[in-house]
Amino acid sequence: MPAWTAQERFAPTGTDAAGRFRFGRVVPAAGEGCRLCTAARTGRTKPTRLYLQPHTRICPCHRRWMLGTHWIDGAPADTEQVDLTGLPEMVTAHRRHLNLLRHRPNAARAFEVAHAVTVSWWAQQWPEEEQWHNRTHRLTPPGADPGWWRLLVRDVVTYPEAVALARVLADEGTMRRLFEDTGGHPPHTLAYAPRLIAELAQATSRPWLPGRIAPTSAGPLLVWAQRSVRAGVEAGADHRWALHMAHRPRPIARELTAYRSATHNGERRTGTAQLHLGLRHMSGQAFATGLVHARAYAAVHGHLAAAIGTRFNGFALGRWLKSHRKYAGMPPEHVAALDALDPWWRPQWPVLWQRTYYQARDHARARGALRPEHGFPTTSFSLGEWLYNQCTGYDTLHPAQQQLLADIGLTRAAVQTARPRRMHMATHFLHTLACARAFAEHHGTLVAATTDTVQDGLKLGQWLSNQRGNDRAYQHRHGTPSPRAQALSAIDPWWNPPWTLEWQRSWHQARTHVDGGHVLDTAAGFPGTTSALATWLTTQCAQYDTLQPGQHDLLARIGITAAHAQSAAARPAENEADFVTALGYARSYHAVHGTLAAAVDTVHDGFQLGRWLRRQRQHARDHADRGRPPSAQTKALSAVDPWWCPPWSLAWQRTWQHIHLQIEAGHPLDTDHHFRSFAPAQRAWLRRQRTRYDTLHPDQQRLLADIGLPRETARTQSPTPYAETALTHARTYAATHRTLTVAYSTVHGGFPLGQWLSRQRHQVRRGTGAARHQALTAIDPWWNPPWPLGWQRAYTRARTTHDNGDHPPADIRQWAAAQQAAWPRLRPEQHQLLTCIGITPRAETATGRRKTSRVYPLGPGMAHARTYATTHGHLACSKNTLHDGFPLGEWLVQKRRAARQGRLSPTTTHTLNTLDPWWNPPWNWTWQHTYQQARLHHAIQDHSPTLRRWTEQQRTRWNSLYPTQQHLLTTIGIHPG
């Protein structure tokens, strides 16, 4: 046994050695050394203890095998060594084992895998196996229990085969042949690695072995083969020798303990009997439960390719199957149980592929041949496209996938003739248009189709929704309806109304009522109609002045004109008696909650108070929009709650009321500590109000002052603890690097400084977070420059080099030259910064770049640029622009890049500047392109919504623009807001 040596670590005292804890599977087995060798060297019979490695268990001199010490029921087993006389193959295997360890660096790990494989074969007790039985018979003493000795000498009898397997597994040629057999795909079973199992059969002298192990779909050998193939495809660590705990052979001591327990209980079990103890027993019970549900699912669907979210009879079967697919160390009996239900329940490809394959298989069984040469005509469009994709990528599929496809008729010869499952777009549209026409003839309109509507097998509702979105985009670009929209308008002119579909559906319901011979009596409150339709009609009369002209025309078709709308009676639920009753519910609700800002689904004492209050707010706002004085109902509700109909959201009012009640109950606001005494949601709300105080309504500011948050308190907020931490990191980083223009991914001391600074720059654009921004400006005045951050970072490098007196590297010299070339397009602040480090505008002197006397002809791109500029008045074209077949956009991109790098010739620069002074602006090129569009639309007085939004952005960001940009905007009538 090894003892403490000088190489061991010392304890904290510095004098004694320190022990180290190691897991049991790492520490080798211990036992007696060869007794004959010990006696010959020491002259004593006392045994010697030592660690037993696989290659040190045989004594070649005395032909003995050291079994080691097996503790059974607290006592060591009687036998620790066996005589190998009569088994010459053991010594031969030992010699080969030592030779393998000398020549193969991974021999030890290969033997560990090989030993696990042979033990798994030994446990199956194949009837063809005779060599292990004969060795066991020779080693068993006369009169001994054969079952006991079979377990005791398990590692002895399997040793020659383990060495033979290790030699095969450690051979690089085996890896190469395995990769060739599988084509780089992890094998589903060992049958897909024929040369591997043939080599194993030859190495172990067992010609019947391939028939036994070829169907194997689990176990250490298959896992090794799969990992070996992945190791040949994927770069990274080599995990092929990793042996899962479930695949490691059970210790012989545990096998013997189980055998003795079974013998004493009168139950003769095989050596593979397991002890049902602890977590293993619980895992077995859980698997048995899942297996019952899996068996029922397979009986219904015919497979186990369930999606991860599948629940079957209340059991999460999809997630259960996924966890077992990922578990490489499943016991063989569990794998066999699931294989019996579905041999492809754990494929080496995505389960989605397998699930779609089963759809194709079921379709082929029900509808006949798939007919790939005709484009899979009997399948659905999605299934046909999937089948065609398998045909086009047939050579890249797993061999097992190719076999499965061959089972449904897609052989290698058949896939060569496959055609795509595609429908002609025009034919498909005509077919869909016919379905829409049939739906409109039956229902009278197309707006009755919801997203779930199916007509003749077509999802008509979803298709109409897509057409509406496409038509709006087409009209936005071209100003006219698309040809498809015109075809649909011929069926129903109001299939895509400019108002909501709900409004159109309600109108169609009213028209159907009128077509049935009824009259809509506005003065009587629309008798004969449903309550919902009467409410809708009354709402249209009340809001008649706010409707669009097209809605007026539609209402006139059903007999509701402007005169009828003015004479309409109030809603049945809003007469004087009902209002008094509802007002009583409102007073009761206010007495409990202190506010009438109830949500729309609020029910108080069985009364739909939320919906009633929403209607009252609509009436009050309609009166205000028409310039009428408040009604008696509005005054009555205002007497209950002055803020029952606020100009801001009701959610804001509810949150304020909840905090107001807490303040009245004595809860301190605690503004100095960022409202930490409130709940997280309320604390976040209060912080938002303080941050956005200046953008709030004056009455909202007055309400905030009532709870202790006046304007002075809101403006004198102190940074939060998180902001203080961020500012500390910013100061430390700036002290080291002299800038805060960091990349977004920058992390300083574990803090995401780059992300935090990016958020602060966004808040500057919104006008919030002034306290933090002032602190950042004090750290670095240019932490948020109006020019790109890349420019500021490059300047910081140049400034650091200049201040240190170092010679600038090539990239900084190139950057400085580019700044000199672009000097007229830089900002005055940039001029000042560059001057401080000695970069000044380039002087046009005779000592400059030597001018050549040779005049180079201009390329063809200049002629196209001149023609384009003459036609459009600028050179701000997109990158994909083609002019008479010439890639003008790409050519201009290359010239801009050359100009910024100082590599563009003066002649080309002068010519392009003459065509368009702003062909290479110092700001973002996209801005210049959009500006030219705005200038064109300004001339024709036609601005699209996109350009209007862009215009508003320029007004809000006016101070961050270049002075030249501001001048260009003023020329087209855009001024600061």
Image: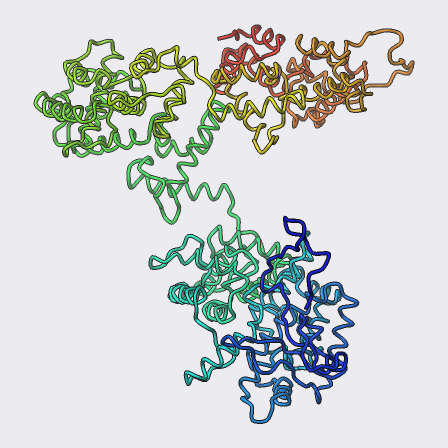
In the displayed structure image, the side of residue 577 where residue 520 appears, left or right: right
Residue 155: where, in percent of width, then height? Answer: 63, 77
* Image: 287 above or below 884: below
Q: Position of residue 508 (x, y in %)?
A: 26, 32
> Which residue is at 45% across, 69% downward?
341
Front-most of residues 503 and 250: 250
| Residue furthest right in the image | 853
Taking depth in this image into account, of 843 and 790 the one nearest to the observer is 790
The residue at the point 53 percent across, 53 percent down is 386
> 684 above or below 379?
above
Up-down relation of residue 149 to residue 301 (above or below):
below
Viewport quadrant of the N terminus: bottom right
Q: For residue 282, what is the image quadrant?
A: bottom left
Q: Quadrant of residue 924?
A: top right
Question: Which residue is most to the left?
Answer: 577
Residue 273, image x and y in percent? 48, 77
621 sits left or right of 28 in the view: left
Q: Is residue 300 visible?
A: no
| Residue at the far bottom in the pictured view | 142
Q: Position of residue 212 (x, y in %)?
A: 59, 78
